[in-house]
Amino acid sequence: MTYRLPYPDPDLQEVIDRNRTARELIATFARSTATLKDLWQHVTAALQDTPTLIAEIFRLRREISRIRLSRANLIAAMQATLGASADNEHDPLSYLRDELAEQASRTRPEGREGGA
């Protein structure tokens, strides 16, 4: 059985398109019903938050992908360490140390030398 996320993965381009259509409709309504202009401005302001939220979703997706890859690499290093230990290799922890060092170097700010 495959794991399903609790929420469906939205097609963000479709969300952007619907948002644009909604803003265009509201602009038309605001022009045709001047007495409701203030109300439409509130709705328009709320719709203007959508692009910011979509950008944040894209950023979070990239971050989740990076974290998943790091986690998978750590699991692989752990498995290699356990296998090397079972095979009585000289330094079975080298796999784990190497992966941890690699991940630390990827997260270290540029221009800073590492030192623990």
Image: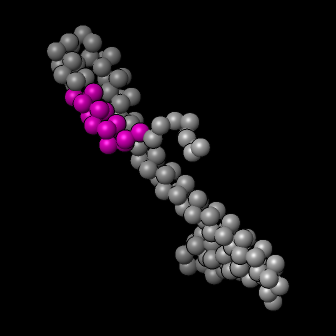
Magenta segment boundaries in residue numbering: 10-24
Residue sitting at x 55%, y 40%: 5
Does residue 17 show up magenta in the picture? yes
Q: Main secondary structure of the magenta part?
A: helix
Q: Position of residue 74 (x, y in %)?
A: 67, 68
Q: Nearer the viewer, residue 20 or 68?
A: 68
The one of 63 and 47 positioned closer to us in this rendering? 63
Residue at 41% x, 43% y: name it.
Answer: 54
Is 98 rendered above or below residue 10?
below
Residue 51 visible? The answer is no
22 and 32: which is toward the camera: 22
Residue shown at the point (64%, 62%) measured from the top left: 71
Could you tell me which quadrant the C terminus lies in?
bottom right
Percent across and percent down for residue 50 are: 38, 37
Q: Position of residue 84 (x, y in %)?
A: 76, 80
In this view of the protein, which residue sits in the foreground, 7 or 12?
A: 7
80 left or right of 51?
A: right
Q: Is residue 16 magenta?
A: yes
Q: Say whether residue 15 is left or right of residue 35.
A: right
Would residue 7 be found to the left or right of residue 97 on screen?
left
Find residue 72 and report its image quarter: bottom right
Please identify the residue farthest to the front as the structure is shown.
1
Percent of width and height locating residue 35: 24, 10
Left or right of 87 on screen, residue 21 = left
At a point 22% along the width and 28% down the height, the residue shown is 24
